[in-house]
Image (cartoon, rainbow, N blue to C red):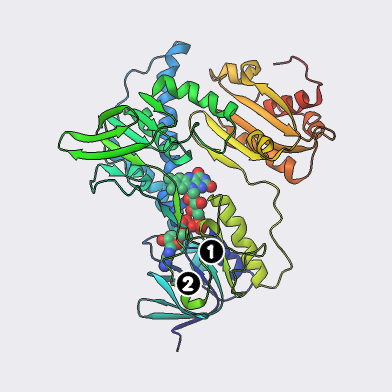
Amino acid sequence: EDADVKVQVVVLGAGPGGYTAAFRAADLGLSVAMIDRGERLGGVCLNVGCIPSKALLHVAKVLSEAEEMSEMGVSFGKPTIDIDHVRGWKEDVVGRLTGGLESLAKQRKVTVVRGTGEFTSPNSIKVGDTVVGFEHCIIASGSEAATLPFLPEDDRIIDSTGALEVQDIPERLLVIGGGIIGLEMATVYDALGSKVTVVELLDQLIPGADKDLVRVLEKRIKGRYEAIHLKTGVESVEATPDGLKVKFGENVETFDKILVAVGRRPNGKVIGAEAAGVAVSDRGFIESDLQMRTNVPHIFSIGDVRGEPMLAHKATHEGVLAAEVIAGHDVSWDVRSIPSVAYTDPEVAWTGLTETQAKAEGIEYEVGAFPWAASGRALSIGRSDGLTKLIVEPETHRVLGAGIVGVNAGELLAETVLAIEAGLDAEDIGLTIHPHPTLSETVGFSAEAAEGTITDIM
Ligand code: FAD
């Protein structure tokens, strides 16, 4: 088959995994093409994921802070929300980043091919009428929102993409799924003025995070949301002119909108992988080894389609790795911990070993914890609802994991990720001088708590 475009490396998918891989490969001197079916580069993360959600969460943060300022003696009154303007601002943020990617691709002479790509052989992908021939391929086709089979077709039932559109502010919103994505959007709509109900099948919100961290978040949102139902599944939804009639547990309630946030489905089955001989799992993942090679050695997989955790920073790390392996570098995956952050209010962040996991696997550990009620900075910003903890190896006190809940927990976590990666002990963090008064001191104090050397200084 004659190729219209011939390159050394083709990247299928232009999300954070794909564009990072394409740019790194081009920087290493390889000829590169990048295929995406989307109108704008950047994949889920930039267009309908990380970035727009954080733009809206910023609006939510300012709204709820303004509301709570009355406790400090300042009242702003009821805010006026121009939802079209909010949406416009969010789209401007997204546009800057995705537009930036276009120029970065151009600068590096990465050929961007738009349309849906499907393998036609182990060395070619067809995009409409265009055939792209390649020596190496990096599959970075990402994931999409999972659905529930029994839901009726109705435009009041939305997924995260619909929620990020902020078409309106529903009076009563039901969020199905109490994971990171569901709760982030709940945070946004709660601040905008919706009455939020969350229904989660498991016995805790944010499954994966330790319960003591989640408890702090739960305490705050219980006071703000209409209801949180754990160990509850939605059984049926009936679309009526007056709203969506939902049956869950003992309840039958009517909502104006439903956000379905029940997980993500990998895009392994939409790329014609069989024509290239690439193995796809039942769920749609395309597995690859520590050098990102699939069962077909010149075809690689990275990002959400490669496996859990489905996070942008994992995708970019894998993207760099795949490009370097193709360029002949002797590198492979060697990561001790991948951080997870829920950008809720307060944020919940964790990395490395969790207590839940340690208990399940019978791993010995000790905890050094520091409640934010004793942090001068947390008190002075009116947000002492927080906890920082380090999970350490009992004998050496080497840091194995960390968990933080509180304002800015995601930013604070980075220090602990470095500690794990560098093989540091709690003592190393404890002896590090943290600026006073900052929330980062809580990391230092939790290390001192692990060492048994903590003094009561705020
Ligand atoms: P994707 O970003 O999914 O990109 C894949 C691209 O491939 C898409 O553009 C898709 O259209 C394209 N594609 C697929 N098949 C084809 C085909 N056959 N032909 C052509 N193109 C194709 N992660 C974080 O780390 N932090 C966050 O704060 C965060 N927030 C999120 C919030 C939301 C609401 C959502 C939904 C996700 C969030 N994520 C977050 C997850 C993050 O978006 C993903 O982990 C990340 O986008 C994965 O990158 P990727 O490169 O693997 O794939």
> The N terminus lies in which quarter of the figure?
bottom left
Residue 28: name its quadrant.
bottom right
Residue most extreme to the right: 395
* Residue 439 seen in this snapshot: no
Residue 240: name its quadrant.
top left
41 left or right of 286 in image: left
Query: Pointers 2 and 1 in contact (CB under 8 A)?
Result: yes
State the CA–CA distance, disc 2 to disc 1. 9 Å
Q: Amino acid at mark 1?
A: Ile
* Residue 294 seen in this snapshot: yes
Which residue does the image show at 28% across and 43% down from the upper left?
A: 157
Which residue does the image show at 70% across and 73% down from the upper left?
A: 328
Residue most extreme to the front: 250
In percent of width and height, residue 291 lies at 66, 65
75 left or right of 444 in image: left
* Residue tagged 1: 286
> In the rendering, which numbered label is found on residue 157?
none
264 shown above or below 371 = below
Compare residues 39 and 251 and report the one nearer the observer: 251
> In the rendering, which numbered label is found on residue 273?
2
- On whether ligand 1 comes within 8 Å of the CB at mark 2, the answer is no
Q: Secondary structure at mark 2?
A: helix
In percent of width and height, residue 171 lies at 26, 29
In percent of width and height, residue 282 lies at 48, 61
